[in-house]
């Protein structure tokens, strides 16, 4: 069981949802704490690909590296943090609705604290995520439903 579990329905095809969610350049558009995100490896994304994501946590910007542990377009992806004091574990799943005209998106998120991250998790990170996650989902839904394919 993850610490955070969110689900939304989106009026876009699973392929459209996948293309938007998996593209690191879109991350700051729908995740309030994401300052920037970039792919670190050459070539197409896949299992083992790494992203450098800088997040605003509390009062500072914290860079972290995430690695894809699952990559199954347009159905599911998984990522885990591999450095930094706070390391996220993310799993996303896209299920088609209405014969593939709409999508059901499920996201599970949990964290591991390392060093000072063990203190930051309960005091800063979890409260921030608890507040931010529903807003991120609404931003994602709005971006997907009001942007041309």
Image (tube, rainbow, N blue to C red):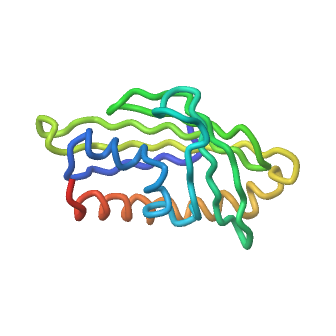
Q: Percent position (x, y) of residue 115?
A: 88, 48
Q: Percent position (x, y) of residue 9?
A: 27, 50
Q: Percent position (x, y) of residue 100?
A: 16, 37
Residue 142 lies in quadrant: bottom left
Q: Report the residue that reaches farthest toward the front.
A: 42
Q: Report the residue that reaches farthest toward the right.
A: 115
122 or 34: nearer the viewer: 34
Q: Residue at x 35, y 49 (%)?
A: 20
Q: Residue at x 82, y 50 (%)?
A: 118
Q: Residue at x 71, y 37 (%)?
A: 82
Q: Is residue 42 above or below residue 47?
A: below
Left or right of 113? Residue 71 is: left
Q: Percent position (x, y) of residue 98?
A: 12, 40
Q: Is residue 66 above or below residue 38?
A: above
Residue 26 lies in quadrant: bottom left
Left or right of 15? Residue 135 is: right
- The N terminus sits in image quarter: top right
Left or right of 23? Residue 11 is: left
Task: Give the number of marks.
Answer: 0
Q: Residue at x 23, y 64 (%)?
A: 146
């Amino acid at each position: 069981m993850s610490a955070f579990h969110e689900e939304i329905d989106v009026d876009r095809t699973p392929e459209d949802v996948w293309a938007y969610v998996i593209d690191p350049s879109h991350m700051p558009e729908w995740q309030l704490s994401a300052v920037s995100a970039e792919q670190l490896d050459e070539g197409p994304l896949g299992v083992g690909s790494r992203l450098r994501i800088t997040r605003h946590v509390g009062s500072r910007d914290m860079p972290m590296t995430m690695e894809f542990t699952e990559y199954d377009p347009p159905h599911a992806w998984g990522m885990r943090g591999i450095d930094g004091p706070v390391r996220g574990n993310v799993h996303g799943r896209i299920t088609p609705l209405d014969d593939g005209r709409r999508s059901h998106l499920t996201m599970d998120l949990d964290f591991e604290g390392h060093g000072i991250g063990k203190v930051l998790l309960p005091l800063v990170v979890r409260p921030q995520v608890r507040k931010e996650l529903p807003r991120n989902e609404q931003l994602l839904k709005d971006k997907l439903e009001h942007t041309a394919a």
